[in-house]
Image (cartoon, rainbow, N blue to C red):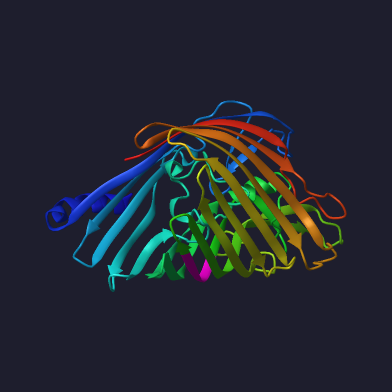
Amino acid sequence: MKLLFILLLVLPLSLSAMDFRVSGYGSIVGGKVISGDKDPSGETEFQIDFYDYAYYVEKWEWDKESLIALQLSADVNDRLTATMQLVAKGADGWSPDIDWFYVTYDLTDNSQIMAGRRMLPMYYFSEFMEVGYAYPWIRPPANLYWWEITQFNGLTYLHSFDVKQWTVNFSAFFGRETQTEIKSHDFWRNRGGYYFPPEGTYIAGTADVTWSDIKGVNIAVANNWLDIRASYFSTRYTTTADVMFFDEVDTNNDGIPDFTVERRTNPDGTPIRSGQWSLTDFDLSFYGLGGTATFDYFTLLFDYNYVIYDDGYGSRFPTFYISAVYNHETWQPYVGLSQAQLKITKDFDGFGTGKAEEHQILTAGVRYNFMSKAALKFELNKFKDKGDRSPWFDFSYHNDATLFSIGLDFIF
């Protein structure tokens, strides 16, 4: 907010020397779980945002996905452009965050360098993942677009060129990102979660996640009916959280503890943090392939991701989404299927190997383009937990549930 205040002071002084543009987007979304099973929390829940850990229960709610965003762009000179995007979400109590803040420098007519904070180009829909108006559904499937980190701070090089009827866009990017007070670990820990420290006991709360040494490439090819993008990046994944210890005190040295002392801080008063080990500090690799194919009567959209954790479990995450949309100017009915798995490839501490988690989401809905730059959507989602509970601990700490939601998406 201090940065925003400074910008509000500086921008009016600079407008006369800049080509200044304002645009934005927003969504008003409500939903309600209409059937399902209770999960370990005792609620019938449907996850719709793994990044902000928003979910619906069996009552109408309108703050889980509703958001408003404002994008400011200014041409500093003929080659340099500055861009900032503010986003306020109902899931975050409408507290505005600076999601993007970067500059773009034109090296040539076909190549650019971008420096600063922007979206991490991992998914096919990464660049407009929160712009509901840009795609047919109310939301991309949460079990595919589920990472805690979606932005990064760093450099991106872009180059575009044409090959006959094809347009080719290539990019390489480098950087890092840290997210503090991530909600995911506390959320899943209270539902049988996945994150265990080598010692100590978790204090209920959040965790911090860092993706360091991010480096990757993207290549996209498109013609008049087909658009395909392949992506790859690697990073070092590190996560920590506050832990506490219970020290047994034997006052009379008889070998029998007389009482227990709870210890949450180090001698210098700082919180005790969980240590780094093979389940909390490891290399991550991401492979993605997605695109759209437009035909006379329908459009096919797809996204496939394969993620490798070099952790103690040797975790592998194959996920995919496929959707078909009827091409009509006003009414666009659609269907979709997403599926996610967790495969364990290393026998860590006698845990075993094999498929530890599997779930899918079936989607059906309709988009109504009732006016320019605005669309109304009605959607039904069915979450199915297909995880195998034997012979491993059940990683599928989800629950079967059906969600009905209504959304109004707009741009300006």
Residue at x-position 55% and y-position 58%: 290
Of residue 254 and residue 77, the one placed in the foreground of this image is 77
Among the 4 quarters of the image, the one containing residue 266: bottom right
The magenta stretch is 211-220
376 to 264, vertically: above or below: above
Q: Taking 36 as reference, is 410 left or right?
A: left
Q: Taking 357 as reference, is 207 left or right?
A: left
Residue 60 sits inside the magenta stretch: no
170 to 248, vertically: above or below: below
Among the 4 quarters of the image, the one containing residue 18: bottom left
221 to 20, vertically: above or below: below
- Magenta stretch secondary structure, dominant: strand
Q: Taking 226 as reference, is 241 left or right?
A: right
Among the 4 quarters of the image, the one containing residue 410: top left
Q: Position of residue 48 (x, y in %)?
A: 58, 41
Residue at x-position 46% and y-position 46%: 130
Q: Position of residue 98 (x, y in %)?
A: 37, 52
